[in-house]
Amino acid sequence: MITNWYRRHIISLEDFTPAEYEIILQTALSFQEVLSRRTKKVPALQGTVIANLFFEPSTRTRSSFELAAKRLSADILNFSPSTSSLTKGETILDTAKTYVAMGANLFVIRHAQAGVPKTIALEMDRLNSGVGVLNAGDGQHEHPSQALLDLFTICMLLDSDRPRLQLLQGKKIAIVGDILHSRVARSNIWSLTTAGADVHLAGPPTLVPKFFADLVPTGVTVHWSLEEALLNADFIMTLRIQRERMTHHLLPSLREYHRYYGITRDRLVLAQPKVRVLHPGPVNRGVEISSDLMDDPEFSLISQQVTSGVAVRMALLYLMGGIN
Ligand code: CP
């Protein structure tokens, strides 16, 4: 596989070009084919050391990156903060430098604080380490690999032989829920608007504040009425309601949220007949989406998102691993 990939770090999708998205979609398609074989492993990253530095809990992203690294024959180091020397006062930068000294080539980093992956990437560059950093979700900033797997999932549904950005041109995509605190929404806004999709954000005023309408890029419309956002939508992306927001009185109750903003079978009648629903997970069943709809393969793409995640993350590690 020969590509024109020049990006050492993936921290944000804000400055991603259409050409970069196309390379990721094509590379993920190749790896999807590898994953359909009896032997699902290729030697592409043999000898490469990948460190999974997850300072915040994760099921999907962490396991998906680990499996992707293994399918590429890389060596993977998993890090757990609670059993690491962070508990003895070591700083995050010193932890990173320790892994570099062991020969790590790529870092996959999740942290509850926005900016940590970027800080480590800058330090890696300052040290001329050659190490690439991939943001696996940082605070309320971005979650690039989630948005890229969402993009791949949608494009594959529209044309599984030739997933490409153009397929999203003019498609109406409603993103519903806690937009204000969502790193998934931020990354998706960048990718979907670059693809030319018609993006509509909807949620309660406390989670989609008025000032937000002035900050969003061209191609994005903000609603407080769920019905307006769902009208003729081709895809609905629901976001996790973060229960901790309840303590800040941003929501009266989860039941109240579901009543006004929950995605249910009844509400899908407003959307296109072939509408599909996505959710990055983890899901609060019966809050963001009704439990029966979540499990309905006619409408729900949630399992495909998880499956796509491995091929997309293989693509990202492969592309970044090729940078000297
Ligand atoms: N979507 C997502 O980031 O899930 P995890 O927190 O389980 O990784």
Image: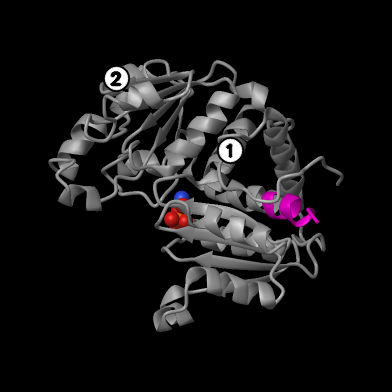
**The label number, if any, that marks residue 153 in the structure image:** 1
Q: Main secondary structure of the magenta part?
A: helix
Indicate yes or no whether the magenta region holds residue 318.
yes
Residue 191: percent from left, percent from top: 56, 32
The part of the image, by quadrant, that contains residue 322 is bottom right
Viewer can see residue 96: yes
Q: Nearer the viewer, residue 178 or 98?
A: 98
Identity of the residue drawn at 15% across and 37% down: 256
**Would the CB of label 2 be found within 8 Å of ligand 1?**
no
Q: Sequence order check: which comes first, mark 1 or mark 2?
A: 1
Mark 1: is the Cβ under 8 angstroms from ligand 1? no
Residues in magenta? Answer: 316-324
Which of the four quarters of the rendered structure image does ligand 1 lie in? bottom left
Mark 1 crowd level (few <14, some 14–19, many ≥20, 10 Å Cα)? many
| Visible residue check, residue 269 | no
Q: Secondary structure at mark 1?
A: helix
Q: Is residue 67 magenta?
A: no
Name the amino acid, label 1.
Thr
Taking the spot 41% from the left edge, 63% from the top edge, the residue there is 57
In the image, 23: left or right of 231? right
- Picture quadrant where residue 131 is located: bottom right
Q: Name the amino acid type tagged 2.
A: Glu
Badge number at residue 211: none
- Who is closer to the viewer here, 61 or 323? 323
Question: Depth check: 137 or 263 in front?
Answer: 137
Looking at the rendered image, the quarter that the C terminus falls into is bottom right
Residue that mark 2 sits on:
227
31 horizontally vs 310: left or right: right
Q: How many marks?
A: 2
